[in-house]
Image: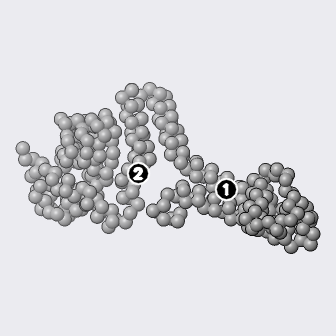
Amino acid sequence: LEKDRHFNYFWVRCAKLICVTLFAVHCAACFYYLIADRYPDPKETWIGNTMPDFHSKGLWIRYVTSVYWSITTLTTVGYGDYHAENIREMIFNIFYMFFNLGLTAYLIGNMTNLVVHGTSRTRKYRDTIQAATSFALRNQLPPRLQDQMISHLSLKFRTDSEGLQQQETLDALPKAIRSSISQYLFLNLVQNIYLFQGVSNDLIFQLVSEMKAEYFPPREDVILQNEAPTDFYILVSGSVVVGVAKSGEVIGEIGVLCYRPQLFTVRTRSLCQLLRMNRTAFLSIVQSNVGDGTIIMNNLIQP
């Protein structure tokens, strides 16, 4: 069940630990009663000392009494109402309490791991934010850059905690599955980009397979003016300031295709999802589809 995706791992682990504890208590209770039942003098036993006629009691009463002493021994409470009366019970108690040391360590260790796992991401996020803030203050970065750093780290924590690690999930899959998912999610969007009007479906499939999905928080620079043209982006959702680019538009393509420094600074206005296409990968694909490359350049220079 721990590996079954249909069940919550935390609750499965808790149920497992509870079952292990109850099984240990049950087995010890049975051994406690067995020792008392087989001892020659019933009154010289842990249960016979306080319940001389325990053989005449109902099965449920005897079982509950045995479990009661077993669990008080396991938890090291030891109220004193039951205790070992003969050498057999003393020997069993010694080994049972040694076993309890290991079981207690196992239970505490597992519960600690479960609790820490639930808070480790938050602690890591706070440490990262603190480190970024210290870095910004130490290097006297302007407030705008500080805000961009904090916003980016906060968005990363949000995507991690809400299960939105889209690209990380895709990267963990084989290329064929990754390509199929990317085509399902983004193929229609990319086909409608002005730059790719009239190109072959094969080229579109290859491009979509190489694109990387990324999230950007509001007011973060995606492209800086005059930086090297290493990537261009397709806006999936949100909006950015160039003039103003909206969902389904491409940004940074002029610098990439003309191999010149980026003409504009591009900054997000809201939370944005972008598809990033690396220049080297893009040109490699286009060079293997020469006719499509001509169509793309014609689309670029059309008014």
Q: Residues within 10 Å of mark 1 (few under 14, many from 20)?
A: some
Vertical comparison of 263 with 88: above or below = above
Q: Nearer the viewer, mark 2 or mark 1?
A: 1
Which residue is at the far left?
Answer: 303
Q: Is residue 47 visible?
A: yes
Q: Residue at x 79, y 66 (%)?
A: 57
**Residue appearing at x 45%, y 30% in the figure:** 136
Q: From the viewer's perspective, tell me whether residue 34 is left or right of residue 151.
A: right
Q: Which mark is residue 163?
A: 2
In this view, the residue in front, 266 or 239, is 239
The answer for how far apart the CA atoms under marks 2 and 1 are is 29 Å
Is disc 1 placed on a helix, strand or loop?
helix
User: Which of the numbered marks, if any, corresponds to residue 132?
Assistant: none
The answer to whether any part of residue 261 appears in the image is no
Quarter occupied by the C terminus: top left
> Which residue does the image show at 87% across and 58% down from the upper left?
50
**Horizontally, is 152 left or right of 109 in the view?**
left
Across and down, in percent, residue 46 comes to 86, 61
User: Looking at the picture, which amino acid does disc 1 mark?
Assistant: Leu
Where is residue 138 drawn, in percent x and y?
A: 49, 28
Task: Name the one closer to the observer, 290 or 172.
Answer: 172
| Amino acid type indicated by mark 2 | Gly
Q: Is residue 55 above or below residue 225?
A: below
Where does label 1 land, which residue?
Answer: 107
Q: Position of residue 112 (x, y in %)?
A: 63, 50
